């Protein structure tokens, strides 16, 4: 399933099985409605608890709003994955915005000078099991979050 | 369709919010609520988030902004209808809606504001 845009996470074992990836554009035209709809469809078949469902949708919401407010446009992809009976979701958000010049600071409260409380990425990091952020300066940010649900 | 509905219950405003609310609509709501509070001598505004499944920092910022403005206009601000996952999200994101009080649902919010449950007039309002 992995392609050039979505390299497999390096510390997950090889016997991981991934399922069809759903991607949706996030920009001024689509807003978050396309990815919300896709994500709901993607997780509907997995019989998740309300809590897990809300956490996954919150991660998507937060990353999506980050794209809209900082990057302008990009896309979000969601991939279900299974390993040794555990179910998880990989959420990848990419944008073509200015990138984050101080990645270390972006996880602390009040770092961002733009809209938002500046807690977004930190909160996503707390909610997800694994969060990787790559800043492709001068343009573009790549955020990959893994959420294991059981 | 607007991602919010505003009802007037005597001197209380009930604002029902859907999660798709964006910046443009927040600006619109800011103006609408401000003028309604002044015109109708409103002394409390209830934000009902029952229809919101997902709370993120952007929605919280917007509600904080609305609450800040309403408090300057001497209106009490209440948030009702938060789901358990939404509450846990608020904790994860360290969101403290300052100066806002909370109720489980609209009924409890009205009770806290000293209103009887049978409100005589309820008007839908979209300015």
Image: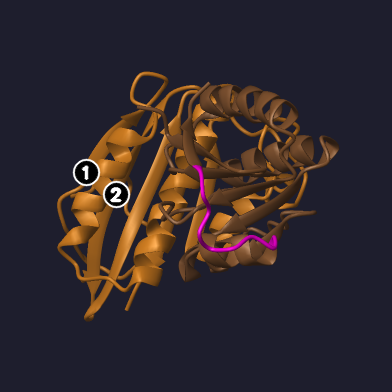
Q: Can residue A58 be seen at all in this image of the molecule?
A: yes
Q: Residues within 10 Å of mark 1 (few under 14, many from 20)?
A: some
Q: Could you tell me what secondary structure mostly forms the magenta stretch?
A: loop
Residue at (69%, 60%) from the top-left corner? B113
Most distant residue in the front direction: B120
Chain hosting mark 2: A
Image check: A28 left or right of A13? right
Residue at (31%, 60%) from the top-left corner? A89
Q: Which chain is brown?
A: B
Image check: A15 left or right of A75? left
Identify whether A79 is placed above or below A27: below
Q: Colour of chain A?
A: orange
Q: Which residue is mark 2?
A: A78
**Which secondary structure, mark 2?**
strand
Chain hosting mark 1: A
**Which secondary structure, mark 1?**
strand
Residue at (53%, 59%) from the top-left corner? B106
Instruction: State the quadrant of the N terminus of chain B.
Output: top left
Q: Which residue is mark 1?
A: A22
State how far apart marks 1 and 2 are (Cα): 5 Å
Picture coordinates of residue B91, whole percent (x, y): 63, 66
Picture coordinates of residue A75, whole percent (x, y): 36, 32
Q: Are marks 1 and 2 in contact (CB under 8 Å)?
A: yes
Q: Can residue A140 be seen at all in this image of the molecule?
A: no
Specify the segment rendered in magenta.
B113-121
Picture coordinates of residue A9, whole percent (x, y): 37, 57
């Amino acid at each position: 399933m992995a392609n050039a845009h979505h390299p497999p996470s390096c510390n997950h074992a090889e016997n991981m099985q991934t399922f069809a990836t759903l991607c949706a554009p996030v920009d001024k035209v689509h807003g978050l409605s396309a990815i919300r709809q896709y994500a709901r469809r993607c997780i509907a078949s997995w019989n998740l608890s309300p809590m897990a469902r809300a956490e996954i949708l919150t991660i998507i919401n937060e990353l999506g709003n980050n794209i809209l407010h900082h990057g302008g446009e990009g896309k979000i992809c969601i991939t279900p994955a299974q390993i040794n009976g555990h179910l998880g979701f990989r959420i990848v958000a990419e944008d073509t915005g200015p990138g984050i010049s101080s990645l270390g600071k972006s996880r602390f409260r009040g770092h961002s000078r733009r809209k938002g409380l500046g807690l977004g990425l930190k909160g996503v990091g707390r909610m997800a099991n694994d969060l990787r952020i790559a800043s492709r300066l001068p343009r573009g940010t790549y955020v990959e979050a893994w959420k294991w649900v059981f | 369709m607007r991602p919010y509905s505003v009802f007037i219950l005597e001197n209380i405003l009930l604002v029902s919010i859907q999660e798709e609310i964006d910046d443009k609509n927040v600006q619109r709501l800011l103006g609408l609520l401000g003028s309604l509070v002044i015109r109708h001598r409103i002394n409390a505004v209830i934000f009902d988030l029952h229809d919101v499944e997902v709370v993120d920092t952007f929605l919280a910022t917007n509600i904080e902004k609305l609450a800040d403005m309403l408090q300057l206009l001497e209106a009490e601000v209440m948030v009702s209808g938060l789901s358990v996952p939404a509450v846990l999200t608020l904790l994860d994101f360290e969101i403290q809606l300052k100066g806002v009080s909370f109720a489980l649902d609209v009924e409890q919010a009205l009770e806290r504001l000293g209103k009887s449950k049978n409100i005589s007039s309820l008007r839908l309002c979209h300015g």
